[in-house]
Amino acid sequence: MYITSHSQYNKAYKKLSNHQKDLIDGATEIFLIDPHNHTLRTHPLKNELSGYWSFSIDDDLRILFSQK
């Protein structure tokens, strides 16, 4: 699997606390191994974000992605 990030993501990531960055890095490692791991709560989005998926980092952080 290959992951690219949007410039808005990169900018927002830089502003996060080290703890939040660690959570994202850990969840991303899990995602690379098993994108539908139950701990990530991966799900498709609806309406204007149809075609995108999301997985959870914690209650306040989500990662949006599309599959190509």
Image (spheres, rainbow, N blue to C red):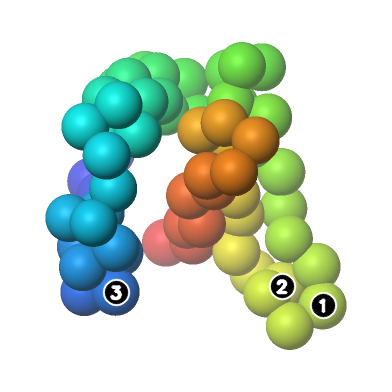
Q: Circle 2 is placed at which residue position?
A: 50
Q: Position of residue 18 (x, y in %)?
A: 21, 32
Decide which of tag 2 and tag 3 comes sooner along the chain: 3
Q: Position of residue 8 (x, y in %)?
A: 29, 74
Looking at the rendered structure, the kind of residue marked 1 is Asn
Residue neighbourhood size for the residue with mark 2, other residues' Cα within 10 Å, grouped as few (<14), some (14–19), many (≥20): few
Residue shown at 52% from the left, 44% from the top: 61
Q: Do callouts 2 and 1 mark residues in contact (Cβ within 8 Å)?
A: yes
Looking at the rendered structure, the kind of residue marked 3 is Gln
Looking at the rendered structure, the kind of residue marked 2 is Ser
Write down the quadrant of residue 50 in the picture: bottom right
Residue neighbourhood size for the residue with mark 1, other residues' Cα within 10 Å, grouped as few (<14), some (14–19), many (≥20): few
- C-alpha span from label 2 to label 1: 5 Å
Q: Circle 1 is placed at which residue position?
A: 47
- Of residues 8 and 6, which is closer to you in this image? 8
Q: Do callouts 3 and 1 mark residues in contact (Cβ within 8 Å)?
A: no
- Of residues 49 and 62, which is closer to you in this image? 62
Q: Circle 3 is placed at which residue position?
A: 8
Residue shown at 65% from the left, 35% from the top: 59
- C-alpha span from label 3 to label 1: 21 Å
Q: Is residue 67 left or right of residue 38?
A: left
Above-or-below relation of 5 to 30: below
Above-or-below relation of 19 to 16: above
- C-alpha span from label 2 to label 3: 19 Å
